[in-house]
Image (cartoon, rainbow, N blue to C red):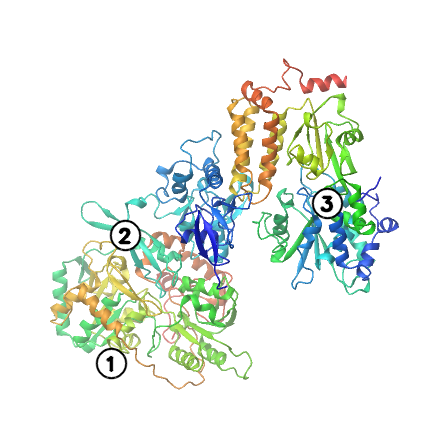
Amino acid sequence: MNKVCLRVNDPGLEAYQAIGGYQVWQRLVSGELSAEVVLEEIKASKLQGRGGAGFMTGIKWGFMNRDAPGDKYLVCNSDEGEPGTCKDTLILRHNPHQLLEGILICAYVIGAKVAYNYLRGEYIREFNQCEHALAEATKAGLVGENILNSGISIQVHHLLGAGSYIVGEETAMMESIEGKRAMPRNKPPFPAQKGLWGKATTINNTETLASVPIIIERGGDWFRGLGVENSAGTKIFCVSGHVNKPGVFELPMGTPFTELLERCGGVRYGRSIKAVIPGGTSMRVIPAKHLEGLTMDHDAMRKVNSSIGSGGVIIMDDSTCMVSALTHMMRFYHDESCGQCTPCREGSGWILQMLQRILKGQASSGLVGQIHDVAKKIEGKTICAFGEAMSWPVTSFIEHFYDEFAHFAEHGQSLVHDPAKGFSWHEHVNRNVE
Amino acid sequence: MSHSIELTINERVIVAKPGERLIDVAQREGIYIPRFCYHPKLSVVASCRMCLVDIEGIGKTQPACATLVSDNMVVKTQSHKAIDAQKAIMQFLLINHPLHCPICDQGGECELQDTAMGYGKGVSEYSESKRVVADEDLGPLVKTDMSLCIHCTRCVRFGKEVAGVPELSFIGRGDTAGISTYLSRGLKSELSGNVIDLCPVGALTSKPFRFKGRSWGFKQQRGVSSHDCIGSNLVYHTMAKGYENITDVMRVVPYTNMALNEGWLADRDRFSYEGLYASERLETPLLKEGDHWRQASFEEVLTLIYNRMVAVDPEKVGVWLSSQMTLEEGYLAQHVFRSSGVENIDHRLWMNADVPLYQRPSSVALGDLHSFDTIVLIGSNIRYEQPILALRLKEASEKGSDIISIGAIAHEYYFPYQCHLTQPQELAMRVFELLHPPVSGQGSLSGKVLFLLGEEALIHVDIAQIQAMVHHWCDQSESEYMLLTPGPNSLGLAASGCTPDYKAWGAAKANGLSYYRMLRNTMDVMWLHQVDPMQDVSDPKRAYQLLKSAFTIAVSAYDTASLRDCADVILPLALAPETPGSYLNYQGLQQKFVAASSPRGEAKMGWSIYHVLGSMLSKVVAKDYDTLSQDVDRAYGTMVWPDIEQVPVEKPKVISAQWMRVGLSSWVRGDGLVRHAAALQQAYPIEEFVLLAETQEASIEGQITNLKYSDTIAPGTLVYERGQVFYAETMGPLDDGDVS
């Protein structure tokens, strides 16, 4: 198996150097390798951002003019907040040096003298690990002032968030680094024009940056060859939900969904799948009927009207009540809306209240249409992508499982959990435990 | 960026400049795009999303406020996509907004209400419970109704970006986010009232005005601020009461004059109208008989005054005028007195020296302050003396001007400045050293400099020398200076002859006694126009002695204890919004206004009092107000200001007095109107300053004016607030020898 991001399971400098770590960085600072070549390799690799949006990393780096005067910054987005996603934590915990090398390479290529790695507030353990790795690398002269006597200086700082989801949005993260409330900015101007402290800034996901050293080492074509067309390389999938063996797997893009499921030991209790959320809760849900022949890559996901997102695969078996699952998700989005712009601030609470009314049995089936309607009104009108992130699950859940929603609204009882019509999830669990 | 670009909005080709905001361009062309959070004077956050428009080639609708125009842009503000977006946002804004417009104070002038008429649905689809937010006490001026808030953050941005005092903030998140001071301590900024205008809904409304009337019932009448020499433009909202043809001022709002106050108004200008309706307003003439006051008729009182005036030696008559007088009143008053042989006329009751003060119009526009490399404040607490000018200083500072302050107190400003803390005894000397550094080239002022002479300088014993030094320096460079005189019309009164220096319109030199000399003479008759001997003069103790010994005729809007102590006759006077007139601001710009409301009771407009007096004394006076006004306009229009007599500049000496005064009264106690505005007095109470004085007793002794904990005070400075608190409790009577 060709691993990209999870190559070592040892956070130490020696372990990383043993597999050839920091070779690319040393070649770069010694002048053996030029920034232009690195940029070309990244472009050739067709590496796409792993944070969720899937923007071409090479193009993003290309927006930066490394020779332009003025400060430039690199931000590594390790605020892994997307529900269902737990990939960056492994990189930060087990492979911090590869990430650090990626950060250094990127910072050098875009001409940044300072790079920030922003970790979510809960990642205190990862933070300590990264700080340790940074200290090791600094001691080895790989980072800081006058790296390996080359005259190149790049400072890397680790920052810990304060527990908000929205800070994972790139412009909100910049606000937070500047010491303000994490509230997304309007785009344009984009970070590459006006980012951190008004300077040109590149912001990349942890997994994206961690992939960089090996891409340069083995070549862009090698990386592209790992995946399929339009989806290069490998991707870390975090499988959670109703499977026997939830876990994190680094697999090539284009891996069949069935293979992923197999690696997780299949659906628990031998039940059948009802739906899958492929890339964190903000992505549209895929009902079981669309899973046949599905592969884990961008094109295939687009065909079933969803997206690979952050790689947080959530599997729901047929005992799942979609109404309560969606309500659960909406509670999260309601809590995490920053409150800055109107549709998200007002809409998140409205949708949640309506869903809760269905759960309480105080609704009629007309409400389901209204929920869908409200979600549609949020989509595309907000400052940041949070509007879509909140709207897509609602609309997709209702579109694919309208009957279930309508039944709950009409009868005040879940179609799934109704003992008269089938089974109760709790009873089922009890039976199985016996 | 002189080249222009073309874009299409709603199929109309429009020419614009690159860098302009789409919402502004559309507005200019008469295409209205609804908005809540956008305000031209504040930064753009695009958070309300109301101004979403459809731009060809971009998938999502875009906020017009955050979108800069570009060449060949095709915008549709009325397409299905745009209208759908705007309607959706409107719905989101309304779901948690209480629909109690009929009992909301903002009803009828609410941006949300107006926009809802165009973009809202007739029926609510919202059947959940509405959000309820606890109110916060923001002090006596601003009332909150936080459930109404639509989170546009205009008030937050105003505090942060314009006023420089970030008092309100956005706290919490999601639909529990709200506007709060966090510390629940109320608003303290001298410009806090502006959040009332900025708030598009009824979340922040005027507390004194609350439930007093409806916007559509008001008549609007333009006016001019009567408290500072900038001449902020404002609008009186007036309402007729009952059948008696009485019109009252209900509230004051700013009028946008980009050259002066932009859209802002200081609290002093906004809330002082309450003083018009204070219980102390004098409504009938009062006459003193023995120790006893009684109401009298105008006829009786005027006969008495006439008899006195014809019997008295004109050289023994003194006239003190208020700088709140209009140009017309001032002109007529001095005309009547001068033609009766009375030459002792002065309105500069703040002076502490018997020297001429050359007041001249300044050529500096407020918008050009940033063109000066350095701005030097000489003895000024600019933030409270001239709040609107202070805003422009902040703007200039942000654009790169250096600001230097020289004076006895390092005030807390919201812009960075370099402070030369100076003992007041040395002020003139320090100014000299600043202009002529002992070691040449070191620390000298360079480039274009603007000097602003504030109250501390104006009341300084050495004001003549300070002005001469600055004038001489400015004469030899492109630099400018301004006298920031108290009151709205000091320059106008100087022009119309209400000073001992010159007769009307600078025609000839006058030779009367100045206020300073009058204090040190005995007078037979003293005439006060809207002057309170305790509050409005620089030396109340001497003023008391003088007025008590003379036969004192006071024309006053208020019946105060100090006037009853000193005066023999009091005539009721109509104040600025109740009288027509004009003020000259610091630029010599004549701003006219008409009477907005009716005078209280029998109170008479100032010009008519002098008109009657003049007629009784058989002087030639204009036959009515219009003629007077035309005469004044013509005379001022052709006026040539006399040359400033240059006195030789020499190095000033340190004054030996132990104590020096460095300020007039606090910014909300500078004239009768503000002193009687209840809410304003409540917001800035005297007690607060007393408390401050105690905490810093070791260093300052006495009563403090406009001070904050963070202000630093030079030793040997007597900071005080005129008023009974100071004299009765804190300091006791002052020793004559100590205070100059």
| Labels 3 and 2 in the same subunit | no
Which picture quadrant has residue A317?
Answer: top right
Marks 2 and 1, how far apart at CA: 41 Å
Residue B508 image label: 1
Judging from the image, what secondary structure is the residue with disc 1 in? loop
Residue at point 51% right, 41% down? A342
User: Which residue occupies the foreground of this view, B662 or B545?
Assistant: B662
Is disc 2 placed on a helix, strand or loop?
A: helix
Query: Are circles 3 and 1 on residues that touch, CB within 8 Å?
Result: no
- Mark 3 vs mark 2, CA separation in Å: 64 Å
Given the current orientation, which residue lies at the most extreme top position? A420
**Mark 1 closeness class: few <14, some 14–19, many ≥20 residues within 10 Å:** few
| Subunit bearing disc 3 | A
| Snapshot quadrant of residue B283 | bottom left
The image shows residue B619, relative to residue A209, as above or below, that is below
Q: Label 1 amino acid?
A: Ala
Residue at the location (52% across, 33% down)? A374
Within the image, what quadrant is residue B491 found in?
bottom left
- Counting the numbered discs, the total is 3
Mark 2 and mark 1 lie on one chain; the one further toward the N terminus is 2
On the image, the x and y values in percent for residue B730 come to: 41, 63
Q: Are marks 3 and 2 in contact (CB under 8 Å)?
A: no
Alpha carbons under labels 3 and 1: distance apart: 83 Å
| In-image side of A180 versus B362 (left or right) | right
| Residue that label 3 marks | A124
Name the mark on residue B277: 2
Question: For the residue labelled by badge 3, is the local secondary structure a helix, a strand or a loop?
Answer: helix
Residue B140 seen in the current view: no
Chain to which mark 1 belongs: B
Q: Is residue B648 left or right of residue B373?
A: left
Q: Amino acid at mark 2?
A: Tyr
| Disc 3 crowd, CA 10 A, few/some/many (<14, 14-19, 20+) | few
